């Protein structure tokens, strides 16, 4: 990036911060703060180990320094400006989750457009929120569009703030479905059988919530699909599973037909063949429903995370704090475009052309000198795909 481009972006970031009110996170004075300035060269220089007291008024700091990126820590400390983590004296940390489209298994880099990547990332966000709200019952959560390729979720419930890394790792394993075994989802019930002198035990798949309910939902969807098929097609469908031959397929289909209500109630062990089939759907549930979070972010009690309301220096988009009821209608490539950069055009020299979806429009940008809407030009310059044209 050439100096005139950096100078232009510094100035326009300052203009944005002059007209934007930034709300700091709770306990801002107990957190470490850091930022990356617009420095020369291919690398980046992180300025960190700062307290809010040292930075001063947050809005004034952003106008004065107009940083490329700005962060605060998940951790709360006695002395957040100390030069080492031990000297800071850790007190507690938010539980932070990071979803990055670059790392999603369903995203194909080089094929999916930016908009498609963000759409898939929002789908993953919904799955994560399902875990946090339904499985864990967390209430104090904050959703943030990162301004780049994904979303952050901050959990600030008192029940999690003092968790050590190993306990945060258990939460990661749960939402990722790591190490999930079908037997973990089975509960044993004692049943008083009619005419029997002693009660018997019945094994049942948990259906009230969690991974049991997810596994059961996928299994029952398959059962209902199976029962709608003609017998020959149903048997062929069952034999597509490894280890299921004609005999086992016939037994499984018969058991499914005769025990549909039992299966709906979670009694998937009514027949050995059905139980063996149901077991396969635990892994299918993990593949379909897990939340593919960036694991080190959640386990790190000292992690620095991007400040909501700040600008992302790699895109020129705003880091947007979202209420849960705003998420459905949120369009990141429209709603995160700063108003500061709209309404006029600037001249740039594009070094890497291509499609750009931004502001509700799609642009086919060619290489060379040209005039573009400023928000598109800022995006290209921030991505290293254009330079500010000489005046």
Image: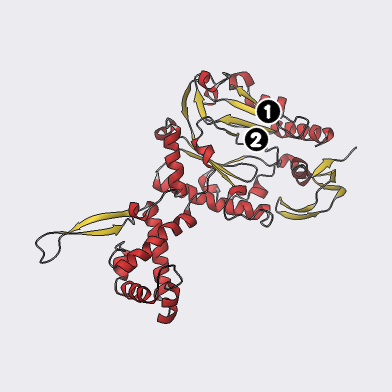
For the question of whether residue 361 can be seen, the reply is yes
Structure colour scheme: secondary structure
Please tell me which residue lies in front, 27 or 289: 289
Mark 2, other Cα within 10 Å: few <14 / some 14–19 / many ≥20: many
Relative to residue 87, is residue 290 depicted above or below? below
Position of the N terminus by quadrant: top right
Asked if marks 1 and 2 touch (Cβ < 8 Å), the reply is yes
Q: Which residue in the structure is indicated by mark 1?
A: 62
Q: Quadrant of residue 385?
A: top right
Residue 155 x %, y %:
47, 37
Q: Which mark is residue 23?
A: none
Q: Which residue shows up at 52% across the image and 31% down it?
A: 74
Mark 1, other Cα within 10 Å: few <14 / some 14–19 / many ≥20: many
Residue 296 x %, y %:
53, 38
Q: Which residue in the structure is indicated by mark 2?
A: 310
Q: Which residue shows up at 65% across the image and 47% down it?
A: 335
Residue 65 x %, y %:
71, 26
For the question of whether residue 139 can be seen, the reply is no
Please tell me which residue lies in front, 106 or 181: 181
Q: Which residue shows up at 73% across the image and 54% down it?
A: 361
Helix, strand or loop under label 1: helix
Position of the C terminus by quadrant: top right
Helix, strand or loop under label 2: loop
Mark nearer the N terminus (1 vs 2): 1
Q: Quadrant of residue 196?
A: bottom left
- Left or right of 205 in this view: 24: right
């Amino acid at each position: 990036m050439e100096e005139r481009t950096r100078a232009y972006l510094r100035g326009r970031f300052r203009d944005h911060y002059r007209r934007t009110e930034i709300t700091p996170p709770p306990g801002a004075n107990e957190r470490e703060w850091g930022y990356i300035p617009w420095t020369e060269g291919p690398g980046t220089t992180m300025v960190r180990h700062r307290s809010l007291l040292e930075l001063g008024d947050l809005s004034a700091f952003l106008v004065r320094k107009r940083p490329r990126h700005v962060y605060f820590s998940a951790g709360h400390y006695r002395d957040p400006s100390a030069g080492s983590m031990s000297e800071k004296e850790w007190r507690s940390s938010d539980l932070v989750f990071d979803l990055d489209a670059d790392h999603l298994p369903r995203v194909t880099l080089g094929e999916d457009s930016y908009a498609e990547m963000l759409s898939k990332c929002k789908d993953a966000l919904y799955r994560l929120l399902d875990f946090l709200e339904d499985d864990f019952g967390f209430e104090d959560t904050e959703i943030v569009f990162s301004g780049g390729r994904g979303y952050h979720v901050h959990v600030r419930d008192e029940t999690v703030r003092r968790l050590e890394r190993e306990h945060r790792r258990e939460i990661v394993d749960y939402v990722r479905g790591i190490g999930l075994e079908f037997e973990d989802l089975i509960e044993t019930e004692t049943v008083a059988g009619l005419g029997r002198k002693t009660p018997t035990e019945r094994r049942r798949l948990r259906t009230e919530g969690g991974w049991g309910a997810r596994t059961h939902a996928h299994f029952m969807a398959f059962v209902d699909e199976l029962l709608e098929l003609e017998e020959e097609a149903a048997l062929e469908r069952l034999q597509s599973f490894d280890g299921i031959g004609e005999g086992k397929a016939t037994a499984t289909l018969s058991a499914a037909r005769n025990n549909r209500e039992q299966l709906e109630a979670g009694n998937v062990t009514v027949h050995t063949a059905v139980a063996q089939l149901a077991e396969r759907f635990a892994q299918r549930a993990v593949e379909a429903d897990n939340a593919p979070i960036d694991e080190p972010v959640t386990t790190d009690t000292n992690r620095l995370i991007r400040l909501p309301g700040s600008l992302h220096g790699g895109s020129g988009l705003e880091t947007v704090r979202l209420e849960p009821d705003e998420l459905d209608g949120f369009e990141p490539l429209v709603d995160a475009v700063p108003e500061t950069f709209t309404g006029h055009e600037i001249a740039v020299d594009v070094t890497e052309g291509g499609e750009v979806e931004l502001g509700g429009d799609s642009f086919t940008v060619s290489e060379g000198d040209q005039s573009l809407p400023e928000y598109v030009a800022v995006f290209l310059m921030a991505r290293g795909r254009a330079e500010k044209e000489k005046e």
